[in-house]
Amino acid sequence: MKRVAVVGCGGAGKSTFAKQLHEVTGLPLYHLDQLHWRPGWVAPPEDEWRSMQLEVAARKEWIIDGNYGKEFEIRFARADTVIVLALPRRVCIRRVLWRMVTNWHTDVQAPGCPEHIDFEFLHWLWRFPYDARPRLDEALARHEGQFDLVELKTSRQVRNYFGAIH
């Protein structure tokens, strides 16, 4: 395990999981939200964003957490392990709402990007099983056999994963 992509629905715990994996493995950790968002929730130009991801994915070792489905191919082409956090939608929504409330106006996702109620994100989260998950599954299928695929569907499976890799 040298290049690990951690993907899944918002609120599934990708960043927390990736931090724990980093602590266990010592692999360099890159959070896509921190790389993507500029202060004020401003996205970089698409060519710059793509170049940034290509540069990180080209490195010898990494853990990259985040979705950004248009660029799954960049990570999946280089990953030796993909971990999908597939927790129930109700869990993800509850966690996101809790994060919004408890971190109100605090920069959690990226510097200069204070937590706030984002109805577009909540809509994406609600629609994840119908819109984003099929695209994720298609990208995974295109790379079938190229990496170890781990899908964790419950909080217990997530917790137990770390005991299994020691």
Image (spheres, rainbow, N blue to C red):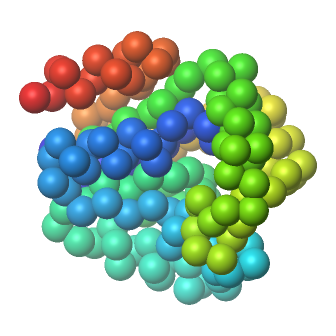
Q: Nearer the viewer, residue 15 or 6?
A: 15
Q: Residue furthest right?
A: 119
Residue 90 seen by the camera: yes
Question: Residue at the location (80% across, 34% down)?
Answer: 127
Vertical placement of residue 62 versus 36, above or below? above
Give residue 3's position: percent from left, percent from top.
24, 54
Give residue 48's position: percent from left, percent from top.
56, 86
Question: Residue at the location (86% across, 41% down)?
Answer: 123
Q: Residue furthest left?
A: 166
Give residue 162's position: percent from left, percent from top.
23, 27
Question: Residue at the location (45% across, 79% down)?
Answer: 52
Q: Is residue 83 toward the left or the right of residue 69 in the image?
A: left
Give residue 72's position: percent from left, percent from top.
50, 54
- Residue 137: image quadrant is top right
- Residue 142: image quadrant is top left
Question: Residue at the location (58% across, 74% down)?
Answer: 111
Vertical placement of residue 66 versus 41, above or below? above
Check the picture and name the quadrant holding the C terminus: top left
Q: Is residue 97 toward the left or the right of residue 162 in the image?
A: right
Q: How many marks?
A: 0
Q: Nearer the viewer, residue 162 or 152?
A: 162
Residue 46 seen by the camera: no
Check the picture and name the quadrant holding the N terminus: top left
Q: Nearer the viewer, residue 102 or 61?
A: 102
